[in-house]
Image (cartoon, grey):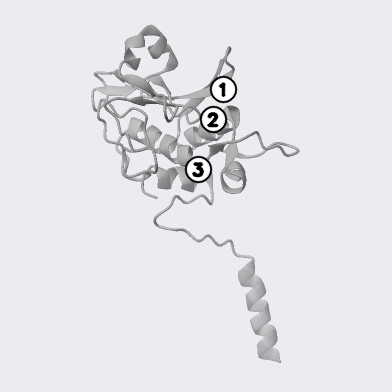
Amino acid sequence: MRCLVMLFACCLSAAAVPLSVVNDRAPDTSSLDTLVASVTRGCRTDDERAVAIYNYLRYALYHHAYPGEPGGIGALKLINVYGWSLCGGEHSVLAAMYEKAGWQWRYRGWNNPGHTTVEASYGGRWHYLDVFLKFYCWRPDAAAPNGHTIASQEDILAQPSLLDGFALDDTRRVVYHREGPTDWTAPRAAGAASTSMTPATAPCPTWGRA
């Protein structure tokens, strides 16, 4: 009987220890810190880290509606419990991941049509990636490791030619880059999740494998 009591006490004490089961083939979503670290593992530049975070959220969240709870919903719960939102919610999660990556960020609101976006600041510039519209594009930057960096919304407005090469696929109703990937069914490899991978700046190999 004494052995059973001791065993029961050991089980109770063990149950109080936090436990996480991590799959080495999937991001660790036990916290925002571990999520950003696992998604961006192996990335060499800030642009690669930004693309890796963007790629992850494109597949982690889908468009449905804004979930609602008293007091609001944290970014990690939206990923692990709901998995859906609209532009403001999705980009609030993106902003939370940017913050964990060590970057400043800012919301950018659009009118007609209404849309909530977010930009990240790294390398002394702002950068725009949209996980709701599935979009980002590149601009020349001699100071960047590969001679190009992800453009900001101001960059695009000042230089509309940055959008040259994008086209609308009427059948799938998606905008894509003519020189980018054409398989939209699933992530195939590191670069398959971007609407624009031109000029080719190979993103890190972390997120893109399902």
- In the image, residue 23 above or below residue 57: below
Left of 207 or right of it: where is 178?
Answer: left
- In the image, residue 116 above or below residue 157: below
**Quadrant location of residue 114?**
top right
Q: What element carries label 3?
A: helix
Q: Give the labeled residue for mark 1.
A: 116
Q: What element carries label 1?
A: strand
**Quadrant location of residue 171?**
top left
Type of amino acid under label 3? Ala
Q: What element carries label 2?
A: helix
- In the image, residue 195 above or below residue 140: below
Task: Pick the residue in front: 144 or 187.
Answer: 187
Mark sitting earlier along the chain (2/1): 2
Left of 80 or right of it: where is 189?
Answer: left
**Residue 60 numbered tag:** 3
Residue lying farthest to the front in this orientation: 171
State the separation of the CA atoms marked 2 and 1: 7 Å
Few, some or many C-alpha atoms within 10 Å of disc 2 (few <14, some 14-19, many ≥20)? Answer: many
**Quadrant location of residue 196?**
top left
Residue 197 in picture, x, y percent from top left: 30, 29
Task: Pick the residue in front: 45 or 63.
Answer: 63
Quadrant of the frame with the N terminus: bottom right
Tell me whether the residue at label 2 lies in contact with that at label 1, contact meaning CB atoms closer than 8 angstroms.
Answer: yes
**Residue 91 numbered tag:** 2
Residue 18 in picture, x, y percent from top left: 58, 61
Mark sitting earlier along the chain (3/2): 3
Type of amino acid under label 2? His
Mark sitting earlier along the chain (3/1): 3
Type of amino acid under label 1? Thr
* Residue depicted at x 35% and y 16%: 163
Few, some or many C-alpha atoms within 10 Å of disc 3 (few <14, some 14-19, many ≥20)? Answer: some
